[in-house]
Amino acid sequence: MNNSKNSILLVDPEFDPNTASDCNLLLKITGDSFSYAIIDKNSKQLKAVFDQQECEDISTDLAAILKNDSYLKLPFKDIKVSVYTPNTIAVPNEFFCTQDLNAYTNFFSEEQSDTLYTRAFARFGFTSVFNLEKFAEQALNTFLASAARYEHNAPVLALASTVEDTSLLIDFTVGSFNALLLDQGKMLFQNTYQIENAEEFNYYLVLLIQELKLDPANTPVLISGIIHQNDELHTCLHKYFNHIHFNLPPAGDIDHAILDDMPAHYYSSLLALDLCV
């Protein structure tokens, strides 16, 4: 294990970089963090996890990591990356038309790349149309051109694939959270919020309860990412909600032994990226 103030690297001591062709690389890029995981699909083992939180300038940090991290230069079998972007819209499948893709960009900000992506979420009844901010698109094209791109809520939706009832899913970084509301298998709401402290989280939480007309006593909350049992964020949730559960990594046949000394929910959404299609 190697770690610095805002980053951590966990590597299986038996990981052989020469087996990279059997491995999938998963990357998660938020507005203030960067993480990746290496999964050996042959041995079905998680081989490495890197996480850097509290990135003050994600564009600079992202470019530096992609350029300098030796693990990211390996010839992987598949590469998947989820990227935070403000330029996204969820189009109900009954209204989605491939001929109208460029019209959807009218909802995007001006700082957008030229490449437009679509991802179908048949389980939830919509297709996501998005592009990446220019710095992210440029960095990926320079260092990981073959990576399949997904928007930031794709891994959380993958975690939610078995959720049947109304549930609020919240995925945390140190300085932000992504909220996703599901009702009977349909996505009703999703948004990302930057937060400085628990007081700001409390403000947004109350706003979500009011605006979405949630019933806190009966709405399960599934949490993942950088949150701890009984910390300020967890305590804040308990002020309003009765049913709070940690959203663990996807159940499957991958051995996550290198995470045994870490809270299991830290990297749930990162590892769920492997389920995205």
Image (cartoon, rainbow, N blue to C red):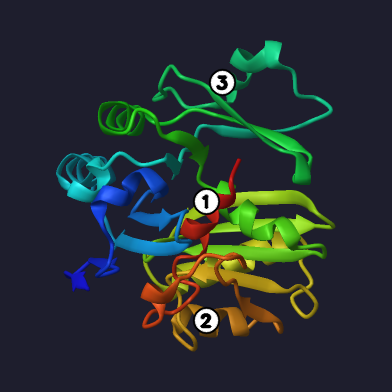
Question: How dense is the environment of label 3, judged by Cα within 10 Å: few (below 14), some, or many (20 and up)?
Answer: some
Q: Find residue 234 and name its label.
A: 2
Q: Secondary structure at mark 1?
A: helix
Residue under pointer 3: 105
- The disc at residue 273 is 1
> Label 3 near label 2: C-beta < 8 Å?
no
Q: Quadrant of residue 140?
A: top left
Mark 3 is on which residue type? Thr
Q: Nearer the viewer, mark 3 or mark 1?
A: 1
Please report whichever mark, 3 or 1, sits nearer to the chain's N-terminal start: 3
Lateral position of residue 114 relative to residue 253, left or right? left
Q: Secondary structure at mark 3?
A: helix
Q: Amino acid at mark 2?
A: His
Res. 29 visible in picture: no
Q: Are marks 3 and 1 in contact (CB under 8 Å)?
A: no
Q: As drawn, is 210 to the left or to the right of 155?
A: right
Mark 2 or 1 closer to N-term?
A: 2
Q: Nearer the viewer, residue 40 or 256?
A: 40
